[in-house]
Every structure is written in structure tokens, then in C-alpha cells.
Image: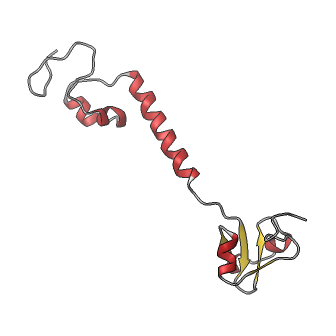
Amino acid sequence: MPCRRGGHSCRAGSACPRISAWSRLTGNQDEISALGARPGRKHGFVRLLLIFLAVFILLANVPVKKFIASTRSEKYHRLECTYAQRIEKRYRVYFFSRGETEMLNYRPCRYCSPGAGRQK
């Protein structure tokens, strides 16, 4: 089957060797159909695998909120603390680490003792 790009001939039923690998992986149908080739079944699996890995890597690097404090007090709590759940939503401030809270001069709650690393 003659290819539309450059006049070379492709084998029947195979993908054009001149299509970029990125177009095959991303499924850029405009470039693929313009060249007269069809992506194979394995390219769909590779594309799905790459998307899954990208989402997994992005979600793994998202920091998790561990502590909460009120803008109206000087104490910080674990998210599970009963006193933390009483803080009104408009006054809540979230932190990712103990160092971050201590840098802003918040003190640990005596009930949930987030600074000690254990729950009562």
C-alpha cells in the first residue's frame, strides 16, 4: 500500500514506520489517519499504561494534610482530634508537617498530642 508521505510503500496491515512513536502512543489520529496507517492494539495498552503511571506518580507526590489549627488560637491538632473537629470551617488552617506549625508558633494540643507522635 503506497504511503501518503514521501511516496514510500508500507506493508499491508502494518503501521507506517514514518509515523512518530509519540503519535502512536498518544493516539494522534490526525497524523495517523493522514498517513494512511492504523494504530495496533498493543499501542492502546501502552497508552493506557502510560496514563496510569502518570496519574500514579502525580498522586504519590501530593502532600497529605496532617495537622489543623485555628486562626483564632495558638494550638494545632491532628485531623482526628475531637477539638479539631470543633473548629469552624472559616477559621481552619491546614498544615503538612509539624515543623511548619512550630515555625508559625503554634503549640501542640494536649489532648491529641501531635508533637509526641501518639494518639491518646
Q: Quadrant of the N terminus?
A: top left
> Would you say 5 lies left or right of 33 here?
left
Residue drawn where x is 42% and y is 34% of the image: 47
Q: Is residue 56 above or below residue 75?
A: above
Q: Quadrant of the C terminus?
A: bottom right
From the viewer's side, name the closer residue of 88 and 107. 107
Tell me the quarter of the picture where residue 80 sits.
Answer: bottom right
Tell me the quarter of the picture where residue 11 sits.
Answer: top left
User: How many dots with numbers?
Assistant: 0
Residue 42 x %, y %? 41, 23
> Would you say 60 lies left or right of 29 here?
right
Residue drawn where x is 9% and y is 27% of the image: 6
From the viewer's side, name the closer residue of 34 and 25. 25
Q: Residue furthest left?
A: 7
Tell me the quarter of the picture where residue 5 sits.
Answer: top left
Residue 90 x %, y %? 68, 79
Residue 55 x %, y %? 51, 46
From the viewer's side, name the closer residue of 68 and 88. 68
Q: Is residue 87 above or below residue 26?
A: below
Residue 50 x %, y %? 45, 37
Residue drawn where x is 21% and y is 24% of the image: 36
Q: Is residue 28 above or below residue 107?
A: above
Residue drawn where x is 25% and y is 24% of the image: 37
